[in-house]
Image: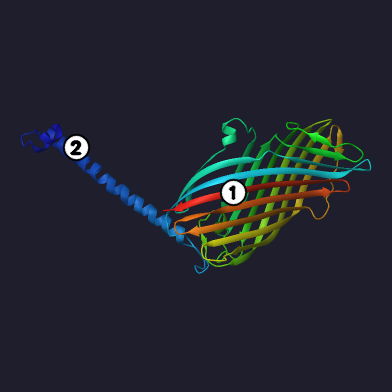
Amino acid sequence: MIIASRVTDNTSPPAHRGSTIAIFLVLMSCMTMPLSSQNIFRRVDSILTKNYHKGNIDTTYVTRPSSKWTLKAQFNLSGAKIESEGIENGKHFKSALTAEYKSTISLGVSYLGLSLNLSLNPAKLMGKYHDYELNLSSYGKRFGFDFSYQDAKNFTGWHDHEGMDRIELSADILSVKTINLNAYYIFNARRFSYPAAFSQSYIQHRSAGSFLLAASGMSQRAKLDWEQKMDLKMLNIAIGGGYGYNFVPARGWLLHISALPTFIVYSNTSLSFGDVHVPLHYHFPEVIITGRGAVVRQERKIFYGASAVYNFTNIGNEKSLALHNQKWRLRAFFGLRL
């Protein structure tokens, strides 16, 4: 009310008129700010839309979803297993240790390829799961990777030694920190889409496959506090390739399977029991294998399905000492496009 009276009062002194004009300009700026914000948003939206749809793809086989927004809910279940086998003093031994399963629930929102996700582990929130695990995935049109880090102390299992009774291994005697990484390159990215199967940011309309180039890495540090302490340090780097195939049996369905065997080209392993060092000699073939599978169903604006990623590492020789590592993840998902 005071501002309005000053604007309409023709008898105001010159100083007051100057301040009135300044206030008027500020008000006009505030009134036009929402319009400017809308223009900025439209410009950003235009850039994102252009980047979202650009790319050298055969739209007969693969397309982007027409919707800008995607809401997605996921249930994840993961696990790990470590096996050892060899000969000690002329007698065969074998052991197997399995980690407690980890389950998480995640919710995500995506806008033109930009995503934000929130994951919760119900068992950890209730104090029933005490390990730590991180899983990261990026499935691009041509490049992508899966990364996992696990710090676990809940392995349980058994140990068999020739001439002895089986020994049950309880939790808390083994501590393991493991990193798994697998990256891929797609040669036929115009017609074959990994994201269609695993992130649903593309849609596969016709069956297609592709040869794949791959690189894998696996690092592990394990400590066993049993009859005698064991310390294991391991680093493996591997390269190789494989094949992936997206099968579209009917409209709205997608079945994916791929295998990426990589051969270890660098290995640095140290294993000791107390003060005794046990050598792990290279024995061909030492491999890191990554397998993936998925089933996706599209129905207008909704989609749902399941996917799986499996990692297997084999080093050493059963005639002396061999180690096998398994890491897997299952995922069920439901999504809505807006």
Residue 291, image x, y percentages: 67, 55
Secondary structure of residue under mark 2? helix
Q: Residue at x 85, y 40 (%)?
A: 160
Which of the marked residues, 1 or 2, is nearer the chain's N terminus? 2
Seen from the viewer's position, the closer of residues 112 and 154 is: 154
Give the CA distance from mark 1 to mark 2. Answer: 58 Å
Residue 44, image x, y percentages: 39, 52
Residue 135, image x, y percentages: 60, 44
Q: Amino acid at mark 2?
A: Ile
Residue at the right extreme of this rendering? 90
The correct choice, above or below, for 104 with respect to 255 in the image is above
Q: Is residue 248 left or right of residue 88?
A: left
Residue at the left extreme of this rendering? 11
Disc assigned to residue 331: 1
The residue beneath circle 2 is: 23
The correct choice, above or below, for 253 with respect to 125 in the image is below
Q: Residue at x 67, y 51 (%)?
A: 310
Give the quadrant of the N terminus: top left
Secondary structure of residue under mark 1? strand
Q: Amino acid at mark 1?
A: Arg
Residue 239, image x, y percentages: 71, 56
Q: Is residue 146 left or right of residue 61?
A: right
Question: Within 10 angstroms of label 1, few (less than 14), some, or many (20 or more) residues?
Answer: some
Q: Residue at x 46, y 58 (%)?
A: 52
Disc assigned to residue 242: none
Q: Residue at x 64, y 55 (%)?
A: 292
